[in-house]
Structure formats: C-alpha cells, structure tokens
Image: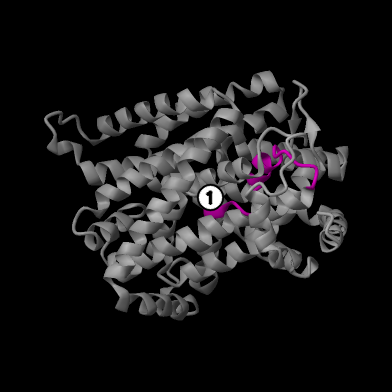
Amino acid sequence: MEAINDFLAILISYTEWIMLFLVIGGGVFLAFYSRFRPYRYFRHAIGITAGKYDDPNDPGEVSHLQALSSAVAATVGLGNISGVAIAIYMGGPGVVFWIWVTAIIGMCIKFYSCSLAIMFRDTDSDGRLQGGPMYYITQGMGSKAKPLAIFFCLAGLVGFLGVFTVNQFTQTFWNVVDPNESIFNLGEFNWKLIIGIVLSIITSFVIFGGLQKIAKVATAIVPFMVLLYFLAVLVIMALNPSDILPSFQLIFGEAFNLKTAMAGGFWGLVILGVRRAVFSNEAGLGSAPMYHGQSKTKEPIQEGLVSMLGPFIDTIIVCTLTAIVIILSGAYLEAENNGILMTLIAFEKSLFGYGDILLMFIVSAFALSTLFTYSYYGTKCLSFLTNAKIGKFFNIYYVATITFAAVASVDLVINLIDLAYALMCIPNMIAVLYLAPKVNQQMKMYFEKKEHGRA
C-alpha cells in the first residue's frame, strides 16, 4: 500500500499542473469569453430550477431540479466537510480563499459543459438518450476525438468510485462511536470491514434501481441535509459572534502568506485550493454534465444556468460554513490527522460536546447520497466503452470497492482520487474550450429570446 501511495504521489506532481492550467486558466478564459453573462442570469437560473419553464413533453428523463439535486448529491458530501478540513490541515486557513476562487470560476465551467451536455446528446445501445463529456467530445469534436472520450471514461472508472466517501465516513464512525468501548471488541480493522459491508448492502438497494430511483432518493435527502447542516453551523456562529469576522480576516490574510503554504510554497497553496474545490464541486471534471444531460429540456442554455447553482451551493455555501466552524473553534490548531477528525473536533467543541454526534448523522446522509449518485457516473463510463448491458456491471465492481475503501489508508484514497480527477479534467476541459464558440452561439440566441419575452 505504501509503495502504491508513493507512486500515485509522483504521478500527481505532474498532472496537477495541467489541471491547474486547464481549470483556472480555462475557467478564467470562459468567464471573459462569455462576457460574464451567465453570472448575470443567476436569478433566472433559480426560476428554471423551480420548474417555471418545465415542459413535460421535452426529451430527457429527469426534471431540472432532479438533475441539479442528483449532481449536488454527488458533490455536497464529505468533500465539503472533510475535504475542506484536509485542505486547511495541509495548507492553513488561506487555502479556503483559493477554494472560493476556483468555485466562482467553476460556475462558468459548469455552465459551458452542461450546456454542451444538452447540445450534443446521443443514444446508447439501448436507444436511450444520453449526455456527458464522452458524447459532446465525439459528437461535437468528431470521431477523431474519440480517444479523448475513451481516456475520460477509463479515468472515470477509478475517479467515480465512492472510496473517499466511504473512507471518511468510516473514520467518522470510528471517532464518534469508538467501537472498542462496546462489548464486541473486534479491533479497528474488523469494525471498519463490517461498516464497509453494511454500506455496500445499503448502496446496492438504491443503485440497482437506475437513474430514476437515484434521482428520487437524492431529491429527498439533499435539501434536508444541507438545511440541517446550515442550521447547525448558524447555531455555532451565533454562539461565537465575535469570532466570525476574525475567521474571514484570517482566510484572506493567510491566502497570500507564504509561511502557511506548507505544501510547496505559494503555488502549492493555490493547487491545494484547486484540488479540494475540484473535489468539492467537480467543476471541469465532467461528472455533472452526465446528470444534467438527462434533463427534460430542449434549451441547452437553461440547463447550463441550472448547473451553475451547483458550485455555489456546495462550495461557496457549504465549504465556507465548514471552514468558518473549523477556524473559529480553533480545531485547525488541534487536529493531528488528515480528514474528518478536524471537523469533528470543531463540532464537538462548539455544540456542548454533542456536535460530533450530530455531524455523524449529517455525514451518514451525505455519504449515502454521494454513494448512490456516483455509481451512475461509472455506469455511463463503462456503457460508453462497451454497451449499456455491460455498463450495468459497473455497479457490482463499485459495491466491491466500498468494502476496500473502508479499510484503506486516507492518504492512499486521497492520492488515488486526486490523480483520477486530474486525468479526467484534461480531456473534458479540452473539449469544453474547443466547443465554447458553439455554446456562445446558443447563448446569444437564448438571451435574445429572453429579452424579447420568448424564453
């Protein structure tokens, strides 16, 4: 395991610079190329999501709200709770600023990629309408670009595993419940193995039901859990009002302080922010277009606008809440381990000694919603590489890796996912940047119609 981890760390050192250039550089380019118009229609995006423009006769499988909920279910999870803690642990409070920057840029990337997911939909071997990077690469860029689509899908077979979620949930359970104190003292490894098996069974009940079942479960779980987490953090902030402003000041002050850049100088700090933001909201990764590509709509720009809400919810809101609690509680100065432990300390200290139990409840729901939705991504990748019937077998492989992740080391899991994400970003962002002019054409027509009251 240690040798594999060292090898992954070496590969990441090369791929992360490409990811940084494509996500930050590409995102900034798209923001200026769009003349910032998508940001100006944020309110309109909320109206679309609320169903104001829904037409049940439009092609697709799920509503705008269900597509957004499913995509957010995959991103609003342990990436927002333990991922932020990992970033602060490795780079200090200043890394949060770069998470914000990446999220704002990521909103524009999501707009372009999810608009493309509707523009270039295709049917699979079962005759069902499908959307996502592999389809807008092959349909938009032509058959010569198919190797890019294949490369994306191969990386996705690893990147779209729920290993990080399972690993961090297991760590949460262990730190809160402490099974060694129970009458069944089975040892840490055996307890984690049992947790992995239980998660595998629960996940199986949902993911084998297909997209419709995943979307319904995600739409039921995500809004409630985000609200509960939001309320818990508001209580903590209300109990520590004098520490809120200093926490923000520390974030901005440390963002450009080289002394806090513990992972490779100033650019190391920026890369940490990009890594964790990409993991948090998946902008540039190409995952969200797979869900948004199934939305019932004929208007690509509508779905692009809806998808912009994802990074805003899961990174600007949820990640910020996590970061403020960690900083104002002082937990970032106490935790000696990566991952969820820092957030657990913050909640336990801030909510009368019982906050860690509440967080475990929230984490459980987040973890399950992420596990349910991620399986769909991998199924689509394998279906594209083979066919729709074989693609369904990804779920068996997916469930098996849940048990493995429960007992794996956190460093190995983080490096594995970071590498897979960087590799997935490359073909997806190349396609998004190449096809951006086509999105601009659609955007011009759509906004002209809206301004004349026809959209």
Q: Amino acid at mark 1?
A: Asp
The quarter of the picture where residue 169 lies is: top left
Q: Is residue 364 left or right of residue 307?
A: left
Q: Read off the magenta span.
A: 280-299
Counting labels gives: 1
Q: Is residue 345 left or right of residue 86?
A: left
| Residue 123 percent location from the top left of the image | 79, 29
Name the residue nearer the viewer: 19 or 389: 389
* Disc 1: CA contacts within 10 A as few (<14), some (14-19) or many (>=20): many
Figure quadrant of the C terminus = bottom right
| Residue 336 percent location from the top left of the image | 28, 59
Residue that carries the numbered disc 1 in the rendered image: 418
Q: Is residue 246 above or below residue 42?
A: below
Figure quadrant of the N terminus = top left
Q: Give the structural element (helix, strand or loop) at label 1.
A: helix
| Residue 189 percent location from the top left of the image | 27, 33
Name the residue nearer the viewer: 305 or 111: 305
User: What residue lies at 44% left-to-right and 51% top-to-bottom?
Assistant: 226
| Residue 39 percent location from the top left of the image | 69, 66
* Principal secondary structure, stretch drawn in magenta: loop
Is residue 449 visible in this depiction of the protein?
yes
User: What residue lies at 24% left-to-right and 46% top-to-bottom?
Assistant: 175
User: What residue lies at 38% left-to-right and 46% top-to-bottom?
Assistant: 410
The quarter of the picture where residue 174 lies is: top left
